[in-house]
Image (cartoon, rainbow, N blue to C red):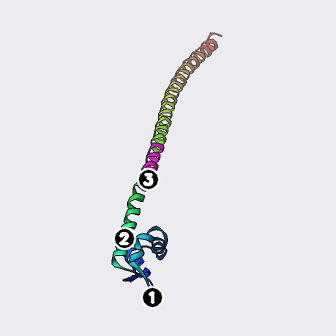
Amino acid sequence: MKTVSEVSKDLGVSKQTIYKKINSQLKVELKKHIKKGSKGIEIAEKGIEIIKQSLNDEVSTFQPVVENELLVQLNRMIESLENQLITKDNQLSTMQKQSENMQILMLGLQQQNQLLLEGSSGSEVKEKRNFFFWNRSK
C-alpha cells in the first residue's frame, strides 16, 4: 500500500490528479483497493495499476489530438511560407526585369551621348574651318 503522495511521485503526476481519479473518475473501480490509513488515503498495488492504466489511456487519446493539431498548424505554416516564397520570387523577377530595362536605357543614353559628342565635334570643326576660311577670304 502506498500513499497518494508516493503514487503521484511514482507515476509522475500531481496529487490532485490522483485524488481526481480516486474521488470521481475511477471511484467504482478503485473502491476495493483504497483505504484510509494513518498517513491518509492508501492505495493497493492493484489500484495503482488501475490509475496507471487510466493515465496511459488519457495520454494515448490525447496524443493523437495534439499530433493532429500540430500537423494542421505545421501545414498552415508551410503553406504560408510557400506563398511568401512565391511572392518573393515574383518581386525578384520584377526587379530583374527593371534592372534589365534600366541597363538598356543606360546603353541607349550612352549611345545618344556618343552620337551627340561625335556630331558636335564634327560641326565645331566645320565651324572652325568656315571661320578661318571666311577670315582668309577677306
In the picture, measured across the screen, residue 111 lies left or right of residue 49, that is right
Tell me the distance, in whole angstroms, between the alpha carbons under discs 1 and 2.
21 Å
Q: How would you rate the neighbour count of disc 3 (Cα within 10 Å): few for under 14, some for 14-19, many for 20 or more? A: few
At 45% from the left and 52% from the top, the residue drawn is 69
> Disc number at residue 50?
2
**Residue 20 point in image, percent of width and height:** 48, 71
In the picture, measured across the screen, residue 109 lies left or right of residue 69, that is right
**Residue 24 point in image, percent of width and height:** 49, 69
Tell me the distance, in whole angstroms, between the alpha carbons under discs 3 and 1.
43 Å
* Residue named by callout 1: 39
| Whether label 1 touches label 2, CB < 8 Å | no
At 36% from the left and 75% from the top, the residue drawn is 48
Membership of 37 in magenta stretch: no
Q: Label 1 sits on what residue type?
A: Lys
Q: How would you rate the neighbour count of disc 1 (Cα within 10 Å): few for under 14, some for 14-19, many for 20 or more? A: few
- Of the two numbered discs 2 and 3 on the same chain, state the one appearing first in sequence: 2
Tell me the distance, in whole angstroms, between the alpha carbons under discs 2 and 3.
30 Å
**Residue 17 point in image, percent of width and height:** 47, 72
**Residue 23 point in image, percent of width and height:** 49, 73
Secondary structure of the residue carrying tag 2 is helix
Give residue 126's quadrant in the image.
Answer: top right
Q: How would you rate the neighbour count of disc 2 (Cα within 10 Å): few for under 14, some for 14-19, many for 20 or more? A: some
At 62% from the left and 16% from the top, the residue drawn is 131
| Whether label 3 touches label 1, CB < 8 Å | no
The magenta segment: 65-80
Of tags 3 and 1, which is closer to the observer?
1
